[in-house]
Amino acid sequence: MKKTSLKRRFVLLLFVLGLVVLLEVLSFVSVSILRHSDLTIQKRNATEIDFKSVPRDSLDGVVLGSSLAYMSVRPDVIEERTGERFYVLGLPEEKMAEAYHLFRLALSRQDLKIVAIECGMLFQERSKVQEIQDTATEAVSVAFPIIKTHDAWKAFFPHEKSDEVREMGFRIEKNSGDVVPADTTGYMAPTTECAPISAYSRMILKEICRQCKKRGIQVLLFSAPSVADGSMARHNALVKLAGDLEVSYVDYNTKDIGIDWSTDTCDGGEHLNLQGAGKVSKAFAEDLRQDTAGDRKTGK
Amino acid sequence: MTGCMSLLSCGEEYGMEYNKPLYLCAFLPLMALLCHYAPERHRRKILIVADLIFYVLLAGKMTPVFLLTVLVTCLLTRRIGTSNGRGKTAWFLLGIVLLFGPLFAFRFLRLFPSSPTGISYYTLMAAACLIEVYWGRLSPLGLTDTFLFLSFFPQVLQGPIARPEDTMEQLRHPAAVHRPEIRAGLLRILWGLFKKLAIADRLNMVVGMLFREYTNYHGAWIPFAAICCTLQLYMDFSGMIDVSIGSAQLFGIRLPENFRQPFLSEDAGEFWRRWHITLGVWLKTYVYYPIVTAKPVLKLMKSTRKKHGKYAAQLLVSFLALTPVWLFNGIWHGPHLNYILYGIYYLVLILLNEALKPAKSAFYKKTGFRREGAFFKVFRIARTLLIVVTGELFFRAQGTRAGLSMIASTFHDFHLSDLTLTNLHTFGLDTADYALILFGTVLVFGADLLHEHGFDVNVWLSGKSRAFRFAWYYAAVALVIIFGAYGTGYLAVDMIYANF
């Protein structure tokens, strides 16, 4: 009886092991296919895959965040002005769990001096269960990337080619050159209120800061200009949060960097166009050069 | 306390539907393992706790309405069981009013912004308990029996609509679960997920656009929309029922089947004996038979037979019994005229079939054609498909006017050449998606055909080597993981029948 039970357990273990091997093989195959594919659907995975093609230990910093990050920060402008190489690890509506995963990926491949975080993603409204699911999905997809890259089989069928250009994570999309003026009524209207930041977002941000501190990496929080997302309530909350975490925070909504909302946005104020991104990137580079360069070089 | 309140107020955001990761990867395996390894005397308690957690996470603040239904059902079955004569009838009628009252208030009068989860399903199951006790076929129920029967979590969201004889005894004494049942359950869940995630959720984009913007489409697009929506409904509903039945198997509970290869039906009546079977059985048991066997109806039948013959009497009784059945069927889906007309559509077709029976028999006799011949069989299946697809078009349309307008516009500017790949891509699906829908549909219908001929995959697998069985299970897992429409680039699609 005991022997039968042991045998059953062994068979079960064998089955689970086989399943793990299957998922690993599928993951390897799908990631290999996507590395050489231009599938539009894989935009989200493309960031990670493209980042992995950057030579190891060749970057000075990364920028984490949503589309506000990858449509505002131009690594070419930063490199031109500071000589430092950046990569924007941004995803559309990047979730905190995804940001953390990309941060860990960056740490494993690059010897970073600075991690800049566009803070729009801290305000995403997600339920507790969604947050747990986000964390679990990221954890599982680290072990089995097939969960994220399962659509790789589509590469074998005729498909629409991606029309975006990616330059170190900065994305030039179809409409990046457009000018669609924004209505700025109520934009950054004064208030003393603080927008709510979930405990989960705080926890992940705190963890990123802790790990950066441990490695002597400087953390910079910033808000990219956006009429749709920028507000004084968010500004107030982030000033307080940055104070609590003892890190720098720059809000390009309040700082005068010459953004003209009648010419610098491609979609009526949600995102910047190429010209607007250029202005933010110059200011970003200037801030890096003036405020933080000394600290970073000494590794404080 | 605050935690409890926020739990109760959040409801659906917990994503506990059968196609969500929280259910599939956490809740179901955890509860199944707990039940599997728990001593037999504790299994029932574990099921009660699992059902309660599941319902609270899904329904949130609507949970008390469900619990009230459980209480009413339990108390009234006791009252009915201990009463006689008029008192018994009075308690029974009161019970029916108390059970269907909330359904009417929530679903039809829309007195509240949202309805309690699964109200359309558990109300029918609760009513079945009352009727069975009233007929003396079931003993009065205890509170835990009633709760377990009505709230069994794999079925509370969208059926199958069980009758007390189907699951009551199994839930009362949950038996030990054996490996073959677990294997069969897991395989059934994977198969259901493939239908839902790979086919139905992909079709959702096409169906959504065609029915939402129906004024922009005409001619060949309308039959295309009808076929797609029929396919989507079948893959979604039967897929999620597979997950329900498979989940229940993990607890050793056998739920009644809800589908039996419906697209192989030869007439509309047979279709409804194969599609949403448990609703059909409920209506037949608790509406059709009581009418047919009612004394006034039997009397009327007798007198009609005397005056106008057997044929007229049968037709009259069919009309009298089937009309409430089909009206109920239509209304049960929701307070929309097109649902009611959908019920009437099938009523007319079934009555017509009944009325034409002698003529059809005469035709086969006169011509010498074999009714069972392959040609006529295929013809009848094709005709039934046309009937079903037309019905689903009307059912899915955004209102009666939209349904009629879509049917009319089929005959306007009909060109099959409109259905080019370039045009099909405008729905947000690419060539690969359409290829997968086609492949998946062939796979599902192929499996249906095998099933129709008595093939049972679990019996077949049990005769194979362990290595072969493992390969089969791995293939099933890979099918769902690779081809499922989840994650990047896809929107999660709700279970269609959970909204009825």
Image: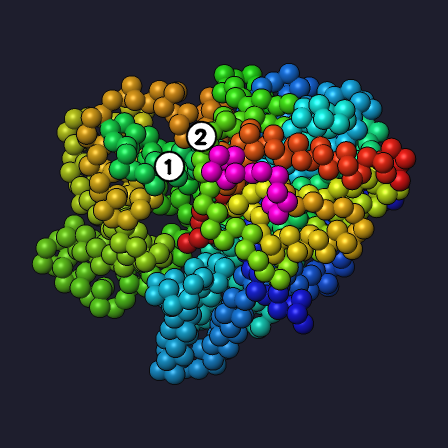
- Marks 1 and 2 on same chain: yes
Callout 2: few (<14), some (14-19), or many (20+) C-alpha neighbours within 10 Å? few
* Among the 4 quarters of the image, the one containing residue A257: top right
Q: Secondary structure at mark 2?
A: loop
Residue B237 location (% of width, % of height): 46, 44
Residue B349: mark in rendering: none
Q: What residue sits right under mark 2 in the picture?
A: B428
User: Left or right: where does residue A292 sit relative to residue B449?
Assistant: right
Work out whether residue B361 or residue B233 is closer to the camera in this orientation and state it: B233
Up the image or down, B446 lies above or below B182; here it is above
Q: Amino acid at mark 1?
A: Met
Q: Look at the magenta stretch and give its main secondary structure.
A: loop
Q: Position of residue B243 (x, y in %)?
A: 56, 44
Mark 1 chain: B
Camera sees residue B451: no
Q: Foreground residue, A35 or B45?
A: A35
For badge 2, the amino acid type reads Gly
Residue depicted at 81% across the width and 51% down the height: A246
What colour scheme governs how the chains and residues are painted in the rendered image of this protein? rainbow
Residue A124 is covered by the magenta coloring: no
Element class at badge 1 = helix
Contact check, label 1 and label 2, Cβ < 8 Å: yes
Q: Where, quadrant-wise, is the N terminus of chain B in this rendering?
A: bottom right
Q: Which stretch is magenta?
A: A253-265
Residue beneath the point at 23% across and 32% down: B410
- Where is residue B420? Give x, y as percent: 35, 20
